[in-house]
């Protein structure tokens, strides 16, 4: 993730220092910066919170650093997948097709049996035209920031 390195350098931190802040090894963190290791949702949220930015900015979905105006700190793993799907009168089968997977596999994300991978979460945010921050209950602001 290209933004991780630039954000870290803006704060004048070493990889070892930021790794310690998020409770991991420098080697593991280095792999995030080089995109050779998948980053968990919890780590993405922790980093966005630490840098005081939106998750969307960290994931390079927007060029606007600012958190959403209705941002809030949520220390849980809830995701608005079921809520937003039902608001749009869609079935799990419909969303599974969007993600090119089985309905059962998708249902595991809604029931928190499996953590949804970031690439699928990003795809859903784009499909629903909402921010990843909204899907993660970090904000109540639905619309994503526009790109500059």
Image (cartoon, rainbow, N blue to C red):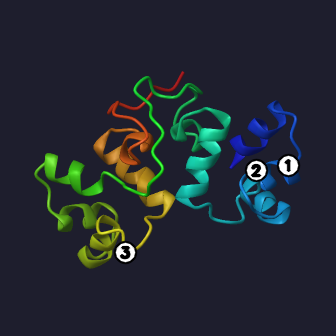
- Residue sitting at 64 percent across and 45 percent down? 47
> Could you tell me which secondary element the residue under label 2 belongs to?
helix
**Pointer 1 and pointer 2: residues touching (CB < 8 Å)?**
yes
- Residue 15 screen position, x and y as percent: 85, 51
Q: Local crowd at mark 1 within 10 Å, few (<14), some, or many (≥20)?
A: some
Give the CA separation, mark 3 to mark 2: 28 Å
Residue 17: mark in rendering: 1
Q: Nearer the viewer, residue 46 or 27?
A: 46
Tell us which disc is closer to us: 3 or 2: 2
Residue tagged 2: 21
- Residue sitting at 74 percent across and 36 percent down? 7
- Total marks in image: 3
Q: Nearer the viewer, residue 11 or 91?
A: 11
- Residue sitting at 23 percent across and 57 percent down? 82
- Residue 84 screen position, x and y as percent: 23, 48
**Pointer 1 and pointer 3: residues touching (CB < 8 Å)?**
no
State which tag comes first along the sequence, 1 or 3: 1
Seen in the image, is 89 located left or right of residue 116?
left
Q: Local crowd at mark 2 within 10 Å, few (<14), some, or many (≥20)?
A: few
Q: Quadrant of the C terminus?
A: top right
- Residue sitting at 51 percent across and 39 percent down? 56
Give the CA separation, mark 1 to mark 3: 33 Å
Seen in the image, is 104 located left or right of residue 25?
left
Is 39 located above or below residue 17 in the figure? below
**Pointer 3 and pointer 2: residues touching (CB < 8 Å)?**
no
Residue tagged 3: 113
Give the CA separation, mark 1 to mark 2: 6 Å
State which tag comes first along the sequence, 3 or 2: 2
């Amino acid at each position: 993730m290209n933004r991780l390195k630039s954000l870290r350098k803006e704060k004048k931190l070493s990889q070892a220092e930021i790794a310690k802040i998020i409770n991991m090894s420098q080697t593991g963190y280095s792999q995030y910066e080089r995109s050779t290791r998948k980053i968990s949702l919890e780590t993405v949220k922790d980093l966005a919170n630490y840098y005081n930015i939106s998750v969307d900015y960290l994931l390079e979905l927007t060029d606007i650093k600012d958190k959403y105006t209705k941002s809030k700190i949520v220390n849980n793993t809830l995701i608005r997948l079921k809520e937003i799907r039902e608001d749009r009168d869609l079935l799990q089968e419909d969303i599974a097709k969007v993600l090119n997977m089985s309905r059962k596999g998708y249902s595991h994300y809604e029931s928190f049996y499996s953590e949804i991978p970031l690439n699928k979460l990003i795809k859903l945010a784009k499909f629903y035209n909402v921010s990843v921050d909204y899907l993660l209950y970090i904000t109540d602001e639905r619309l994503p920031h526009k790109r500059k």
